[in-house]
Image (cartoon, helix red, strand yellow):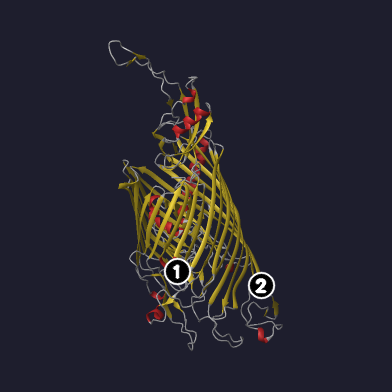
Amino acid sequence: MSRSRRTTAALLLAVAVAVVGAAGRDARAQPPPLEEVKPPTVIQHQDAVYPPSALAERKHADVVLVVTIDADGHVSDVKVQTSGGADFDEAAAVAARQWTFVPAARGGKPVPSRIRVPFHFAPPAPPPEIVVDARKDTPTAAPPAPQLAPSARSAVPKDGDRDLDEVDVIGRIRRRPIGAPEYESVIGELAAVPRATAADALKLAPGFLLTNEGGSGHAEQVFLRGFDAHEGQDLEFTVDGVPINDSGNYHGNGYADTHFIIPELIHAVRVLEGPYAPQQGNFAVAGSADYELGLDRRGLTASYGAGSFGAQRLLVLWGPNDSPPGTFAGAEYYTTNGFGVDRQAKRGTAIAQWEAPLGRRGALRVNLTAYATDFNNAGVVREDDYEAGKVGFFGTEDPNQTGNTASRVAMSATYEGRFSQVEVSQQLFAIDRTMRLRENWTGFLLDVQEPLQLPHPQRGDLIDFHFDEVSLGGRGFARWHGDVLGLRQELEGGYFARVDTTQSTQDRVAAGTNQPYAVDADYQSTLADLGVYLDANARLLPWLSLRGGVRADMFLFDVLDACAIKSVDDPSAVVAPSQIDVSCLSQLEHGAYAEPFLRSATGSGTVMPRGTVVVGPFQGFELSASAGNGVRSVDPSYVSQGIGTPFVTVESRDLGVSYAHDFGDAVRLTAKSDFFQTHVGEDLVFDPTEGRSTLASGSTRTGWSGAARALGHFFDVAANATVVKAVFDSSGACAPYCGLLVPYVPDLVLRGDAAFFTDLPWHLAHQPVRATLGYGVSYVGRRPLPYGDVSDVIFLSDASFGLGWTIWNARLSAQNLFDTRYRLGEYDYPSSFGKYLPAPTLAPERSFTAGAPRTVLLTLSATVGGS
């Protein structure tokens, strides 16, 4: 057993012994319900006015209201629970709507809540009797009788009150944070920093580099902690728990296109770097990222933006005032001519979500999403062609990479319930996805003349890839919590189930005619992933916790390769000689007839222990040490009948420290520092001749990451950094990569974001004008390339300035503010885009994809009926 496996096993055993032993000592402990909730506190209240219509009867009345308080501390809804009469009810509601609160908090974060507020109405004393003093000309008032003023008494529990039955928190059940490797970033005021796509929000966590060689509708290539996750193969992506990664995508298994997420609907992003939570599933190798959707700005918002390169964006958002932020609807249309040749794109997205309580202990969330995009792809440019003036920096080597499309239709339903000692969650989802991608990495290089083929010229290496996927699945858990020895303990059991039906085809298309001339792949697959896990949070001492458990996943693959025999070395006798260069023909193997298709099925499982020791907090500091195993499934082309393991394993370790402190009411500071090491059994390396990532030998990443964020009354500033070295194994079956640096992985990534906001010192029509300034900066160090070469560094700045007045907002944003000319992606491999050369050279040459120049967008928006 390796050292990392022994460490992980020891952590798991400690967690299991602590939880089982503690539960056995006091299984009947009754914790106070919702112990983690801090109730709202009244800041300002308004007494109710005794209704004039009731003065004649001078009666007393009692009204009990159910008041909903949003995450900003404002009253968003008022309902009458106990009526005192229509006039009294209305008077109480008018008063309650003017109250303001410090919002309820769960785990230190503001959340919407619902409380009961009673009002007691007493009739006012009669007016004072007017007495005329004969000795004076002026009447005087008699001494007033004791005044029975109308009253309003809040039922909000005070700090330290253990009875929180009056508070219903409208929030989501959240998992305990793991420790230093976990980053939960609420977007908040940092929304002022320009972000073109949902993927850009990931940069609030350390170590992320995003590139894109496939066009604006293509998933971003993600680099994190020394991993080239390509389009998502090493990072588990979810949106409110619903998976984003494609399973069985031949172009890139784990492909994760996040363009369907409207950036304004992202409330927070939760990134766990490393496989340390039992809830993490397939593709959680470098870690996992979950987008939490929500609309904080309520009401109806209409927005229109126009900018560089013919960009136009129309956005409509709606969030009813009497509903929590999880209830919203949004629609977006975006179009651009692109910043160079063949970069046109357009997309449309609609997302609707309904979140509502079911009784006092449950909540239901239903989400519907539809997305479609059409985009062109400029591809790569050879460095020597650019220097010779044959191709512009923003040009293209192959103008036929057009007509790319993608779509996504998804529906999910999530139920969450809170009971005295148990929290439960159940989610079901259905997803239909398609994509088509045309790209050419090598030009006219691979279509060589085979001996038995009819003579033909180079027809080009343009790839035409198509993918269809239907996913059905669900996930759920039940979490018990109780007091044992005066400390809160938790035990959670859960499952994940997903079945995918997919079809991947990849053809080679002839230049000029766009007719397919060869089949690279034709796979029809049924893939299943069934996982079960046990998670615990055992508090041994007030300052010592063991968190983690074990996860087991079973993978099943049933793959039909409709073009299993691609060579023409031994064609069947029934095939005419003039047809021997047709793809996927029947063949003769050792004299036996063979059909061109092949079905393969296999299955295997893996057990993954994961655990974390947390010490603290002490004076705001918390130490954590984590160890865990993860898994990544392979694409269908690597499945063999009854043999082979359809997944790759990873072992990871982290040691870090976190700090959080409030400096009065002025500043809240959080910071993290984390050292990590991760080993992967088989890595994936991008192969331009295949147009996708292929399996390579094992590799190890060692590095450090850190992050800090400070939030004050007029600013929100965040910064992070990652330093990493990624090396292939130097022993075992490591050829041809033995001991080399993993290509394309940056050694240093720095990111900073800042937002400043304040009301200006003048008013328009007696209304304040609010100004917002956002600024972001990124630095990416050199990336190793094949054949010992290295890339250039990248240094970029983004900025925005906005003004808000009453319902109106105007914002001017610029990305790549200083118009830096940079190479977003750099590669080193053989290619030949000159069709009429006598023979293509196999010498490697630097190629690149151009980063976007300065792009400016002016956006005007208005919000009515909300706040």
Name the secondary structure under disc 1: loop
Q: The disc labelled 1 sits on which kind of residue?
A: Gly
Q: Is residue 194 left or right of residue 553?
A: left
Task: List the single residue furthest toward the front.
Answer: 137
Of residues 89 and 21, the one nearer the viewer is: 89
Question: Quick check: 195 above or below 765?
Answer: below
In the rendered view, would you say 50 is above or below 506?
Answer: above
Query: Residue at position x 47%, y 44% from top?
Result: 537
Q: Is residue 366 above or below residue 677?
A: above
228 and 85: which is toward the camera: 85
Q: Between label 1 and label 2, give the one nearer the viewer.
A: 1
Place of residue 56 in the rendered image (x, y in percent of width and height, measured from the top left): 49, 20
The x, y position of residue 547, in whole percent, is 46, 46
- Can you tell which mark lies on residue 597? 2
Relative image position of residue 149 (x, y in whole percent): 41, 22
Crowding around mark 2 (Cα neighbors within 10 Å: few <14, some 14 to 19, many 20+) is some
- Separation of marks 1 and 2 at Cα, in angstroms: 42 Å
Q: Residues within 10 Å of mark 1 (few under 14, many from 20)?
A: many
**Coordinates of residue 860 in the picture (x, y in percent):** 41, 56
Query: Which mark sits nearer the N-terminus, 1 or 2?
Result: 1
Residue that numbered label 1 is attached to: 338
State whether residue 559 appears in this view. yes
Locate the C terminus and report the quarter of the image it occupies.
top left
* In the image, residue 494 above or below residue 376: above
Q: Residue at x 68, y 78 (%)?
A: 586
Identify residue type, mark 2.
Answer: Phe
Q: Which mark is residue 60?
A: none
